[in-house]
Amino acid sequence: MSRKIVHVVGTGTIGEPLIGLLCDFKDSLGIDEVTFHKNTPLTTDKSKVTNLINVRGARLTTHENKFDGFNNIGLKAEFTTEEAINRASVVIDCTPKGFGHENKHKYYEKYINNTLGFIAQGSEDGFGKKYARGINDQALDANDQFIQIVSCNTHNVSCITDVLAVTNDPDNLVVGKYVCIRRANDLSQETGFIPSPQVGTHTNEKYGSHHAKDSAELFHTLGMDLNLFSSAMKVNSQYMHILWFNLQVKEPTSITKIKERLYANERVAMTTKDLTSTVFSFGRDHGHFGRILNQTVVVEQTLNVKNDHEITGFCFTPQDGNSILSSISAAEWLLYPHSYTDKIQCLSHLFFNKI
């Protein structure tokens, strides 16, 4: 039996914790080896790369012309870029916007005959079939060699819509409206912070911001045509994104019913905390190196049902956590299509019911 090798391209906001999580649970996930690509030999990144190699057990790869640069800062790359892709069972691309498509055309399409599949992140629209764990697993089929994990806020929009509106009846949703209140940048990012709240634009006449568009396209893989519209803005915080949602549904409902649905779903964490800082702190103390892997954290006391048909509330987005889990789920589906749902249960202790 061939070795199961997962290769992660990029060591940024999603890549670094994903590499660590794959290494920490590789035996339970049925993975023999984790390799990762680092593009640039930076002394500021030496500590994290050293940790990923020596502590977590991953193997470093880079471009052939970068080997000397890594050697000069005391890091040894073991494979070239294309050697690593060629020997990988699954490749997960976690590079910045645009590079996933570039890598697809430059590298990945050359190795489609000996690699099970390639996965990219939310910024790479059109890379492959959109996917979010627990939302559209049944849409995956043997022809899906390229998969795009939707963004963290799209996970949240889709999860709320799925659980509260369309799980039992795809025609139940009349309209879903959302406002994504985004943090300015990630804690690890040195640029992008803003001095004050900044409103976004509606780039799509039908859907508004990309969040509703991407969510609608995710549900399209299931044959659903949902009426969704989103707006987005940034605030001068680094903690968590916030989502306001308003769902108008055909079937009468109540606060009791929607709470029962939310508490019963493993992808949802409930909380009475109303500050992003306190939820973020919980993740730091109890998550996997700070990550909450749920798709959404719903603030229970904000839930409201008006006239039996209009559901409103606030929830927090676990940022890279939900994208990381879907990335692992997609990789496991490519490796073990008939048992991947059982294999990822090794991470179930990181799905919180209450925060």
Image (cartoon, grey):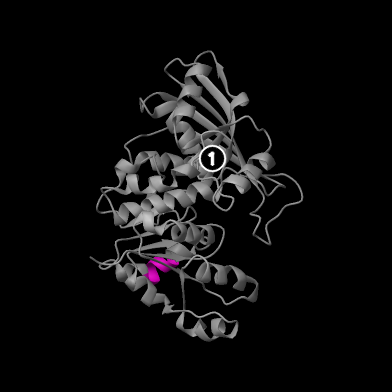
Q: Amino acid at mark 1?
A: Gly
Image coords of residue 280 (percent x, y): 64, 44
Q: Is residue 206 visible?
A: no
Residue 265, located in which quarter of the rendered image? top left
Image coords of residue 254 (percent x, y): 50, 16
Image coords of residue 352 (percent x, y): 52, 38
Tally of numbered tags:
1
Residue at the far top in the pictured view: 307
Q: Is residue 256 left or right of residue 302?
A: left
Going 40% across and 43% down the picture, which residue do you hit?
Answer: 217
Image position of 128 with respect to 197: above or below: below
The residue nearer to you, when weighing 125 against 81, is 81
Residue at the far right in the pictured view: 195
Image position of 95 with respect to 227: above or below: below
Query: Quadrant where the C terminus lies?
Result: top right
The residue nearer to you, when weighing 90 against 291, is 291
Going 43% across and 56% down the picture, which residue do you hit?
Answer: 25
Q: Is residue 47 left or right of residue 92?
A: right
Image position of 140 with respect to 247: above or below: below
Other residues around mark 1 within 10 Å, as few (<14) / some (14–19) / many (≥20):
many
Q: Which residues are magenta?
A: 102-107
Residue 106 belongs to magenta span: yes
Going 52% across and 73% down the picture, which residue do you hit?
Answer: 39
Residue 73, located in which quarter of the rendered image? bottom right
Q: Is residue 296 visible?
A: yes
Residue 273 belongs to magenta span: no
Going 45% across and 49% down the picture, which residue do you hit?
Answer: 325
Image coords of residue 314 (percent x, y): 60, 31
Find numbered disc 1 in the image and state the secondary structure of the residue it sits on.
Answer: loop
- The residue beneath circle 1 is 208
